[in-house]
Image: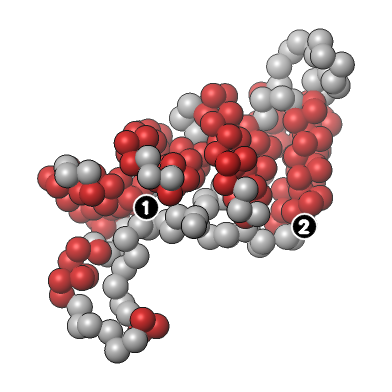
Amino acid sequence: MRKGLPNRFRPMAAGRYAALTMCAVLALTACGSSDGTAKPDPKKAANALAAGLDAQSKGNLDEAVTQYNEALKYDKKNKYALYDLALIDAARSNYGEAENKYRVVLAIDPAYEPALFNLAILVKAKGNNTEAISLYKRAIAAAPKDASAHLNLGLLLRANGQTAQGNAEVKKAITLNPKLKDPAVSASTSTPPKSPETSDSASPDASPTPS
């Protein structure tokens, strides 16, 4: 988990970063800009992205924002810079801005699983369970072994009255990650806690939603 970011949102796995610099280079468009901004420059975009990742990992979010915007100046469709800007917006409770950026990321890459997962959390927090269910399904299609996505989807399906489908998703989540617990089972079998602090009950959502 990156320093300085809330653990309710999913950053990209650290192991992926080594490949991102090259990905940023390959993703750049070939044409110049007609609105007065900088022309695409693969090297400058890649360097700025790397600098942003370094600053973000150290908790220097202001510098990270500057560097990610620099990367976008040279590559407007850099989904990695946009994604990390969304993470920072969420860390600062700017959930509307985070949502907007996740949607831009998904317009660039509709199957980008981290953005699908995080956007599902945000729209669920707004009460839009229908879109959240759709987003989790897309996240699972992109990453079938994502246990947290299966669990969150299962709980939403249950809440939506689709009990059989929800139970199947929860079971799949626990199969993929036995450390996860079914909140319904925990609630029916656990001893009532002496105080809230000693509760062993699982959270009703594998990824807590913003308030």
Task: In the rendered view, tell whether residue 14 sits above or below residue 192.
Answer: above
Does 22 sit left or right of 117 as displayed? right
Q: Kindly identify which numbered label has been placed on residue 17.
A: none
Around disc 2, counting alpha carbons within 10 Å, would you say few (fewer than 14), some (14 to 19), or many (20 or more)? some
- Name which residue lies at 14% across and 47% down: 163
What secondary structure is found at the residue carrying circle 1? helix
- Residue in front for this viewpoint, 194 or 145: 194
Quadrant assignment, res 28: top right
Does 88 sit left or right of 133 as displayed? right
Q: Quadrant of the N terminus?
A: bottom right
Residue 108 horizontal/vertical position (percent): 57, 24
Residue 152 horizontal/vertical position (percent): 33, 50
What secondary structure is found at the residue carrying circle 2? loop
- Name which residue lies at 26% across and 57% down: 174
- Name which residue lies at 49% across and 57% down: 211
Q: Residue furthest bottom?
A: 194
Q: Is residue 150 visible?
A: no
Type of the residue with mark 2: Asn
Residue 134 horizontal/vertical position (percent): 34, 34
Q: Residue furthest left?
A: 164
Q: Is residue 32 visible?
A: yes
Whether pointer 1 and pointer 2 mark residues with C-beta atoms closer than 8 Å, the reply is no
Quadrant assignment, res 19: top right
Around disc 1, counting alpha carbons within 10 Å, would you say few (fewer than 14), some (14 to 19), or many (20 or more)? many
Mark 1 or mark 2, earlier in chain: 2
Type of the residue with mark 1: Ser
Kindly identify which residue carries mark 1. Answer: 148
Task: In the rendered view, tell whether residue 182 sits above or below residue 127.
Answer: below
Kindly identify which residue carries mark 2. Answer: 60
